[in-house]
Image (cartoon, rainbow, N blue to C red):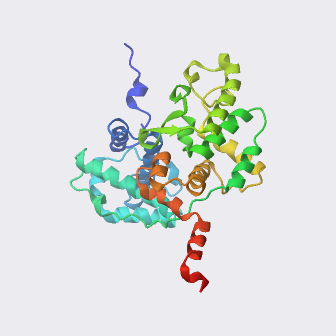
Amino acid sequence: MKLDFDKIRGKNIDMPICVRDFLNYLEVIKGKSPNTIEGYKIDLTMFFRFIKIYKNYGEISNSMGFSDIPINDIQNPILKDINLSDLYAFMSFTEKQRNNSAYARARKVATLKSFFKYLHGKAKIVDENIALELETPKIDKRNPVYLTLSESKKLLKTIDGTYKERDFCIITLFLNCGLRISELCGIDISRIKGDVLTVIGKGNKERTVYLNKACLEAIESYLNVRNLVLGKIPMQDKDTLFLSKNYTRFSKRGIEMMVKKYIIKANLDSTKYTPHKLRHTAATLMYKYGGVDIRSLQEILGHENVSTTQIYTHVDNEKLREAIKSNPLSKE
């Protein structure tokens, strides 16, 4: 049997061996999603480029751009020489020179904590986990950005054109089910059984989504159109629900551009409303108008912690206004 050497080497050949091993560990043992692994890779790439400059490792010319700094020469002695102060210096760099938000910096802290835990506990490369004491930046909790009920209806009414059945179905699922964009892209027809849809959520976790009448009607209408082009769909995408104009699985970028087009057409702010904000909209509408309790909303959205879901308990100013008015002293 002929061996595929490129597959054996892997797709992260430009990364240090320790990072390649770590990413493989996340994928094979921890079952992390491709998006999560890519995020870790980006964070660690930035970290090691910074470390090479900050600690003066290797040959780096002043004319070299930050993104051009190679990191595949990072060896174990360098890892052992990194200390907690270096981690804080990196966090300062991300804030002051890369303008990272508190949220982005918190993600990098999570990456470093996971990486050095692996280096110490699994790979046995470093003698101590220096990231144990690394603190996470405080993230101010913000109310979710969402469309009102009337704006949601307005958005749905703007959908037309060659792919109107597909686009209407996608936005209907966003607004009714609160799906993540990756979950929506990954929908296969075989995973729809009656009013039950099974999606692969964050961390490769399977989640059950129940489809209401609007969703079922939108899916049926789209499938009628989709079935007219069955012969043009590549074998690997025969089970794919949402297809691009090339009859392959609709990409996340494609969906983002499609949503933006209709947001603009509905005279809404395209810098403010994204597919993720449509997920916020679904959750908000269910909480405000459907009387859905916070635990049920957690299950629907696929949140691991209920604290993530609790942002939706702060969105209904009308309820707060009525609560104050109900105070028996309000009429005194």
Q: Is residue 272 left or right of residue 207?
A: right
Is residue 53 depicted above or below 11 in this figure?
below
Q: Split into 4 quadrants, where in the image is the N terminus?
A: top left
Residue 166 image point, x, y percent: 68, 33
Q: Split into 4 quadrants, where in the image is the C terminus?
A: bottom right
Residue furthest bottom as drawn: 332
Which of these two is toward me, 165 or 54?
A: 165
The residue that appears at 57% across and 74% down in the rendered structure is 326
Is residue 66 depicted above or below 158 in this figure?
below
Which of these two is toward me, 33 or 212?
A: 212
Which of these two is toward me, 80 or 219?
A: 219
Is residue 131 depicted above or below 162 in this figure?
below
The residue that appears at 68% across and 45% down in the rendered structure is 259
Residue 61 image point, x, y percent: 48, 55
Residue 264 image point, x, y percent: 75, 50
Q: Is residue 17 left or right of residue 287?
A: left
